């Protein structure tokens, strides 16, 4: 099947001839501009998706989707509360916990930390601590043996390793004839975990639930129950429904109350970066305007001849729309290919740049995430592709319309 002559002429005009090398160079610059803008937009959106995913995974791997705590700091009949929560069809698992502040002392060094008493087998169902333990094992937390699993930064600050002893100082004192004496207990370090977030790595310690109950004199009470649900984004609704189902003097809260700012900030940043980088793509796309205007000026004689041969103004307009669209399509293709390749391999590219420059972009002491994550979502790629292509087409309309208005007599007067 023969191709329309508008398409053939438009394709021919994109190649350099004797008189229009400069125009072809400007076309190349336009292609590269569109390609770089599209690639940057894809990579940035992938990185923002990666940050959002990492924050959700790390925070909710340590925290809980929903937390039920006693009003006075203790929850006496927690098995009944857990059983009532389990009746909700979207609650997947539950685990009791004891939580309080404490201080760890080793050879004169003192560090404050949040102590959480857990049942290791039940905790696996609501959190991912086991995956973060890099030394020792969570299974070594056994009732009555007073073992402790420390965050990596906390262990480093105390200068202890697996097998060492630390002294835990509980805030609740023991009343003696000499006055109130702080409660001290020696614990053995049985593991060290590293979540990758400084807040937890430097300020959280895990002990067995029974040891925590004995240490803080809670008896059979616990501080609360942690729940895991099917869809974490439905946690607020599930919390409201559970409030009507649970018959206990307890306070229910979900992760959105304590960590929503992190996710809201990432979502806003993603939208703003999308808008800003879309403007960069728009600037690159509208470079086509100057390219096509110069092409129309250079090809006025050709346009006049085509008009005298019977070409309609619409056909002349189609020729230059094809030329501009082809430039935009090639640039778009290069940008999508480069952006997808970089987004999929950013975990290799960024460490290489860090080694070459001798710097670390994301310090763990400053940022919650110390590595640059990437989560390529094809919906974002298609959205960027459509926007860039539409902008490229819009950029061709004015030059093409101007070409269609060329007067053949005026164009051939000095030929």
Image (cartoon, helix red, strand yellow):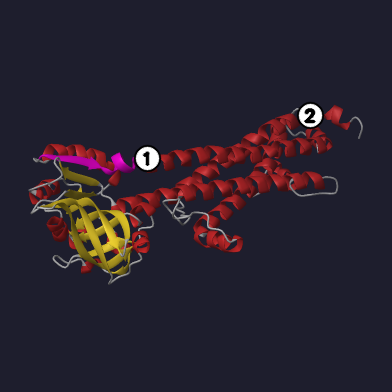
Q: Between 379 and 314, which is closer to the camera in this rendering?
A: 379
Vertical order, 296 against 359 (above or below): above
Give the quadrant of residue 159. Answer: bottom left
Q: Residue at x 32, y 56 (%)?
A: 111
Magenta span has 250? yes
Give the quadrant of residue 220. Answer: bottom left
Q: Which mark is residue 378?
A: none
Q: Which mark is residue 406?
A: 2
For mark 2, does the 10 Å Cα neighbourhood hold few (<14), some (14 to 19), or many (20 or more) residues? some
> Is 122 placed left or right of 202 in the picture?
left
Q: Name the element at disc 1.
A: helix
- Provide residue 147's location: percent of width, then percent of height: 21, 66
Give the quadrant of residue 158. Answer: bottom left
- Provide residue 281's location: percent of width, then percent of height: 60, 41
From this viewpoint, is residue 46 visible? yes
- Provide residue 76's location: percent of width, then percent of height: 8, 48
Q: Residue at x 27, y 55 (%)?
A: 103
Q: Between 39 and 364, which is closer to the camera in this rendering?
A: 364
Tell me, yes or no, whether the two marked residues, 1 and 2, touch with CB atoms within 8 Å.
no
Tell which residue pokes out farthest to the bottom in this image: 163
Circle 1 or circle 2, nearest the eye: 1
For mark 1, does the 10 Å Cα neighbourhood hold few (<14), some (14 to 19), or many (20 or more) residues? few
Q: Name the element at disc 2.
A: loop
Magenta segment, which residues?
249-260
Magenta span has 396? no
- Provide residue 193's location: percent of width, then percent of height: 32, 63
Q: Which mark is residue 261?
A: 1
First-in-chain label (1 vs 2)? 1
> Is 15 placed left or right of 179 in the picture?
right
């Amino acid at each position: 099947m023969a191709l329309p002559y508008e398409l053939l002429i438009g394709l021919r005009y994109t190649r350099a001839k004797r008189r229009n090398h400069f125009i072809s160079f400007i076309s190349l610059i336009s292609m590269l501009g569109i390609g770089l803008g599209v690639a940057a937009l894809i990579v940035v959106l992938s990185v923002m998706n990666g940050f959002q995913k990492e924050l959700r995974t790390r925070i909710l791997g340590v925290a809980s989707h929903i937390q039920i705590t006693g009003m006075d700091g203790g929850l006496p009949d927690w098995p009944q509360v857990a059983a009532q929560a389990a009746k909700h069809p979207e609650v997947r698992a539950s685990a009791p916990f004891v939580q309080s502040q404490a201080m760890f002392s080793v050879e004169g060094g003192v560090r404050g930390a949040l102590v959480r008493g857990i049942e290791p087998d039940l905790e696996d169902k609501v959190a991912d601590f086991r995956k973060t333990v890099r030394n020792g094992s969570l299974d070594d937390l056994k009732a009555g043996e007073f073992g402790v699993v420390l965050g990596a930064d906390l262990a480093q600050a105390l200068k202890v390793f697996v097998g060492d002893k630390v002294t835990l100082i509980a805030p609740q004192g023991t009343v003696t004839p000499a006055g109130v004496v702080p409660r001290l207990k020696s614990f053995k370090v049985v593991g060290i975990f590293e979540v990758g977030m400084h807040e937890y790595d430097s300020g959280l310690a895990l002990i067995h639930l029974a040891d925590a109950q004995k240490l803080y004199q809670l008896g059979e009470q616990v501080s609360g129950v942690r729940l895991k649900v099917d869809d974490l984004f439905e946690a607020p609704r599930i919390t409201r429904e559970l409030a009507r189902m649970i018959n206990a003097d307890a306070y229910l809260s979900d992760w959105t109350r304590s960590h929503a700012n992190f996710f809201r900030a990432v979502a806003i940043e993603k939208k703003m970066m999308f808008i800003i980088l879309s403007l960069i793509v728009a600037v690159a796309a509208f470079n086509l305007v100057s390219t096509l205007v110069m092409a129309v000026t250079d090809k006025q004689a050709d346009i006049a001849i085509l008009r005298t041969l019977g070409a309609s103004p619409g056909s002349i307009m189609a020729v230059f729309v094809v030329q501009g669209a082809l430039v935009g399509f090639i640039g778009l293709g290069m940008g999508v290919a480069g952006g997808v390749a970089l987004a999929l391999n950013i975990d290799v590219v960024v460490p290489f740049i860090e080694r070459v420059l001798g710097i670390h972009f994301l310090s763990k002491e400053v940022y919650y995430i110390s590595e640059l994550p990437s989560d390529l979502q094809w919906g974002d790629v298609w959205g960027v592709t459509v926007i860039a292509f539409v902008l490229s087409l819009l950029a061709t309309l004015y030059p093409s319309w101007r070409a269609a208005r060329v007067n053949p007599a005026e164009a051939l007067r000095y030929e």
